[in-house]
Amino acid sequence: MSGSTADQVKETARSAAAKVEEAAVEAKNNPVKAKNDFLHTPVVRAALPFVNGGLSGMFATACIQPIDMVKVRLQLAGEGVKTGPRPTAMGVARDIIAQGKALDLYNGLSAGLLRQAVYTTARLGFFDTFQTALQSRAEKNGTQITFLERGAAGLTAGGLAAMIGNPADLALIRMQSDGLKPKEARANYRSVFDALTRIAKAEGIGALWAGAYPTVIRAMALNFGQLTFFAESKSQIKHYYPNMSESANRFGASAIAGFFASFFSLPFDFVKTRLQKQTRGPDGKLPYAGFLDCARKVVRDEGWLRFYRGFSTYYVRIAPHAMITLIVADYLKLITS
């Protein structure tokens, strides 16, 4: 991915932060208007972390979907061959556009939005709920939340959310990889719901949880890198740079979190993509028996470094997505506090 593209994506994150900050300032200057009875009922207070998480994740996905499409195609290129093609992110993007139209970069957007509505709603909601409980306990005991406590909250929230969101994640991979097949073999899914229905009918309900194991591990790794490091970085930046503005604190912490989220989760994301893309061959067998079998075959046939193929594209996809999600979620939390 070129430097100009990365700069454009980063600018999108900054623009999103600026727009939401306007609403945050209004809420801060007029707290009576911002804090109404409806927002402070027990049911709404419990639901808000989940609603805010889902909205922020869906907004980020709408911005980042083309990069995610390119990332998936990079991971599936040269499958099973160590010396296979070595496409570039720009090359993949050009091929997608050449074979259809620019909007093909948004294939699977409905699945991506559904995934965020389910997965990000759950992971950010659970994490915020866990953090609130930890903060209350820390204040009661006169202590601070530790890094290990934040880490445990991030791992747990990611694992729970991944199990809930796996069907939408699988549909997203199937829709994005459909264009790699010969025209006569393509499923041509009309929407995420069409994909979910047809996959369940053809392969059984259980197929919707294909790749759930690496999905859960990937989510735990990503959440550990993203949510844990975001919360910890915000705390540390505030401690060492008390005069830094809240918006600068959020932006810096989210950038740090984006890097660690990418680094920890890419190998698991790679295996997850391979497992969710696979379909039975003419002999009725699947290429991979499971997570460990897929990892072993990739190492044997393609080499260790294949797990980090497309890291720059993955980082440009994960980091801005993490930044937009975390910044928007943080501002939504401020507005509705």
Image (cartoon, rainbow, N blue to C red):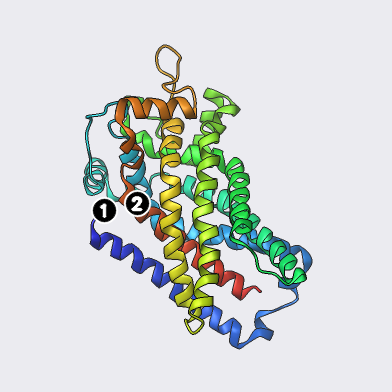
Residue 329: % across, % down: 55, 65
Q: Quadrant of residue 269?
A: top left
Q: Quadrant of residue 333?
A: bottom right
Residue 196: % across, % down: 53, 35
For mark 1, what is the residue?
1
Q: Residue at x 45, y 16 (%)?
A: 285
Q: Quadrant of residue 82?
A: top left
Q: Dot 2: within a 10 Å radius of its alpha carbon, few (fewer than 14), some, or many (20 or more) residues?
A: many
Residue 212 to residue 13: above or below: above
Q: Residue at x 62, y 52 (%)?
A: 152
Q: Dot 1: within a 10 Å radius of its alpha carbon, few (fewer than 14), some, or many (20 or more) residues?
A: some
Residue 9 to residue 182: above or below: below
Residue 275: in sight, yes or no? yes
Question: Is 329 left, or right, of 106 in this rendering?
Answer: right
Secondary structure, mark 2, is helix
Residues at marks 2 and 1, CA–CA distance in whole angstroms:
9 Å
Q: Residue at x 55, y 46 (%)?
A: 220
Question: Is 204 left, or right, of 293 in this rendering?
Answer: right
Residue 74: % across, % down: 31, 40
Depth check: 308 or 175 in front? 308
Amino acid, disc 1? Met
For mark 2, what is the residue?
67
Amino acid, disc 2? Ile
Q: Which residue is situated farthest in the bottom direction here?
A: 29
Q: Residue at x 40, y 72 (%)?
A: 15
Quadrant for the C terminus, please: bottom right
Residue 190: in sight, yes or no? no
Secondary structure, mark 1, is loop
Depth check: 316 or 194 in front? 316
